[in-house]
Amino acid sequence: MKILKITHNSGFFSCYSKRLEGIIWFFNKNKCLPDQVDSKEQFSLYKENSLDDLTSLYFQDNNINIEYKNTASFYNYIQFFDYKKIDFKTLNPFIEKYFLPSNHVLDFVSFYETKYHINYDNTCAVFYRGNDKSTETNIASYEIFISKAREIKKQNSNTKFLLQSDETEFLEEFLKEFPDSIFIEEVPHMNKKNSSISHELPRIERAEFGVKFLAAVLVVSKCKYLITHSGNCGLWALLYRGNCDNVYQWLNNSWDYNKMSIFNIWQENKKYVKNIFKKHKDWWVVIES
């Protein structure tokens, strides 16, 4: 019995990305799925007790098989690449099998949909990750996101905006122009600073914050239009969406990407990409009889 143990710990969706990265590594190396994926050591930032296992709080089992036909591709730094280049067709079965949200999370999705009267067919999600994300990538100004929202509103005057942001000032600025926008009150936000919500919350509240935040990202993923930043949060909204239709991604100071900008990002990260498949410190395989 081959058990793939994932031990990476960092931000919420960083844990997701590393879990998927390890699964894809195993799949390519062994040309089959592991017998079990063990993530109980992950999400330590969200645990009240270090021995807690939050796996079942966020995921549920999905007993489907994925046969090896071709090499799959995924690594953490895809968060800073053009999402239109993602092979969704290959990755979608892995998301369906290993990242199916728990019923507790899905209950919050239904709660949000009812409370905020969300009609996905005429809703544009605006996903702005601020605060300490500026230490990893270039963050767009508020006006850049608001301007893109104006363009979509001009195309369809019935469009309503659903906001998801960790930065209070962004919400305030956006609501000045589009005061009828929805934002999910159950997911906390904070004044701009070099930190993250998960570090600011009392530890006793963090596990449930993960549930509410994941549910909000699932709602974001289902909207007809999506304006998003580049980062693990935006990436997972796309992975749950399963495609890049009607998606506007801010990447490398632009909404539009060219070959040179993608090449520059690749040059910056290719050493990391090579190393993760040589010395994978965030996961290992345990053999049990």
Image (cartoon, grey):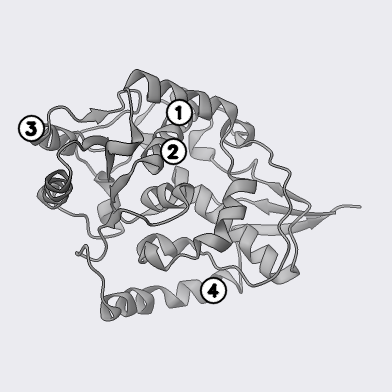
Q: Which mark is residue 218?
A: 2
Q: Which mark is residue 176?
A: 3
Q: Nearer the viewer, residue 181 or 289?
A: 181
Cα–Cα gap, marks 1 and 4: 38 Å
Q: Where on the picture, by quarter, is residue 42?
A: top right
In the structure shown, which secondary structural element does the residue marked by tag 2 occupy? helix
Cα–Cα gap, marks 3 and 1: 27 Å
Q: Residues within 10 Å of mark 2 (few under 14, many from 20)?
A: many
Residue positioned 35% across, 28% down in the render: 187
Residue contact between numbered discs 2 and 3, judged by CB atoms under 8 Å: no
- Of mark 2 and mark 4, the one earlier in the sequence is 2
Q: Look at the image and tell me whether residue 165 can be seen.
A: no
Q: Residues within 10 Å of mark 4 (few under 14, many from 20)?
A: few
Q: Which mark is residue 59?
A: none
Cα–Cα gap, marks 2 and 1: 7 Å
Cα–Cα gap, marks 2 and 3: 26 Å
Q: Where on the picture, by quarter, is residue 264?
A: bottom left
Q: Nearer the viewer, residue 28 or 154?
A: 154
Q: Which mark is residue 275?
A: 4
Three-letter code, disc 3: Lys
Three-letter code, disc 4: Asn
Residue 59 left/right relative to 259: right
Residue 208, position in %: x, y?
48, 26
Q: Does residue 125 lie above or below 106 as drawn?
A: below
Residue 108, position in %: x, y?
46, 24
Three-letter code, disc 1: Val
Residue wearing tag 1: 109
- Of mark 3 and mark 4, the one earlier in the sequence is 3
- Of mark 2 and mark 1, the one earlier in the sequence is 1
